[in-house]
Amino acid sequence: MNPLTQSKNTTILPVLIALTLGCFALSPQARAVEPAPDGGYPNQNTAEDDDARFSLTTGTDNTAMGFDALCNTTGSDNALASWVWRATGSLNTARAHHTATLLPNGMVLVAAGQGNRGALARAELYDPASGTWTATGSLNTARYWHTTTLLPNGTVLVAGGLDNNFRPSASAELYDPASGTWTSTGSLNTGRLYHTATLLQNGMVLVAGGQDSNFIAFPSAELYDPASGTWTATGSLNTARAYHKATLLQNGMVLVAGGQDSNFNTSARAELYDPASGTWTATGGLNTPRYLHTATLLQNGMVLVAAGQGIRGALARAELYDPASGTWTATGSLNTGRVGHTATLLPNRMVLVAGGSFGGPVTSAELYDLASGTWTATGSLNTARAYHTATLLQNGTVLVAAGIGPDLSHILSSAELGRRHP
């Protein structure tokens, strides 16, 4: 079900989100921010602002040369340096709830997603050198709310998701960048969507949780072995969950936090998966229950969880998980509460959060500084968007692609690049 319009007592199937784009609107309860930053609610974009920002044809500084000159990053690594965004080539197919994977050759693979007419099988490649998208082989199964994982051999594993029959899919397939084609691989033991997929240090892929064929969160987990192309059941989560986040820690364990449980309650529970034993152990719970948040592994080994959907609406709160103590500590709140956003760890060790929805898609972006534990507003996206992707490119720029548009009535094909300035 659409998590932005459901309450814990609602049991409407999630497949309804494919029937109308109007379902992406936030409920009235989701318009509140916990806590309200600066003692009040952040300013909302007006229709005029949205219309102006949506136009990617205004202005003249859209060439790579002009942008590179404007965003010259030589000099000091100023933590407070702002980000500027410029339009880049649009995707061939508008989509949201897709995935984006940085390939070893520096290109970005965008796969599947929800289009204007349902689940997509189409995939395309972004070339940072030319700033253009090129169609590549289509998936064998159209899907969205799936996962993609870059494997050690350079292929990309796609698993699960919601298919064109509005059913959770068990199918999995592999993309070969050399041939540009998809090949079916072993199917999951259980079809699922809203799950997570994590590449373990031993090269296997852990898929955990999600919603089952009844569209209810369940605790099952399984492992994909690239050598055999098969899935094997592993220990189940202690708490059934969907819309959660999974993070590979530096010690090889996997941290799963938050999500929505089988009763559609927003969860604060967290647990750790040990690949050696194949079991899950409860760890400290989040201070604030949430789902559809982001979780970012920082260079110091801690995990930053930011924003997401809380019990009473879109959250601005953020917190840090310390693997040494197994506890969460509140850190500075974002300036704008949001859900359906992205979080990108930058080379300067800051975290860039961009877009998302707060009463509708927003353009705002902000930077988290671990040293001070604070968030600073930075340059806004050109187009308000939510449920997009953000990919750190090899040249240090961030590619933001597609998503739900500013007026909630259509899905985007536009993309933009962000870089520090100066």
Image (cartoon, grey):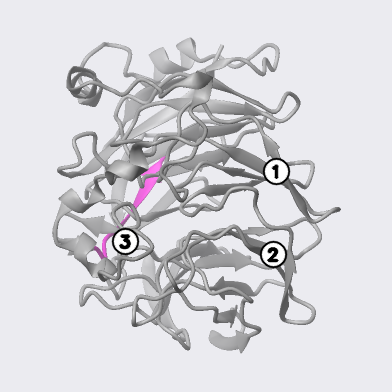
Residue 120 in the image: above or below residue 127: below
Q: Which residue is mark 1?
A: 320
| Circle nearer the N terminus (1, 3) | 3
Q: Is there CB contact under 8 Å for labels 2 and 3? A: no
Closest to the camera, between mark 1 and mark 3, is 1
Q: Amino acid at mark 3?
A: Ala
As drawn, the label of residue 385 is none
As drawn, the label of residue 112 is 3
Q: Which residues are magenta?
A: 120-127
Q: Amino acid at mark 1?
A: Leu
| Circle nearer the N terminus (2, 3) | 3
Question: Of helix, strand and loop, which mostly describes the magenta segment?
Answer: strand
Label 2 vs label 3: CA separation? Answer: 26 Å
In front of the other: 396 or 208: 208
Q: Amino acid at mark 2?
A: Val
Magenta residue check for 121 = yes
Q: Secondary structure at mark 1?
A: strand
Indicate the position of residue 118 as horizontal and vertical percent values.
18, 63
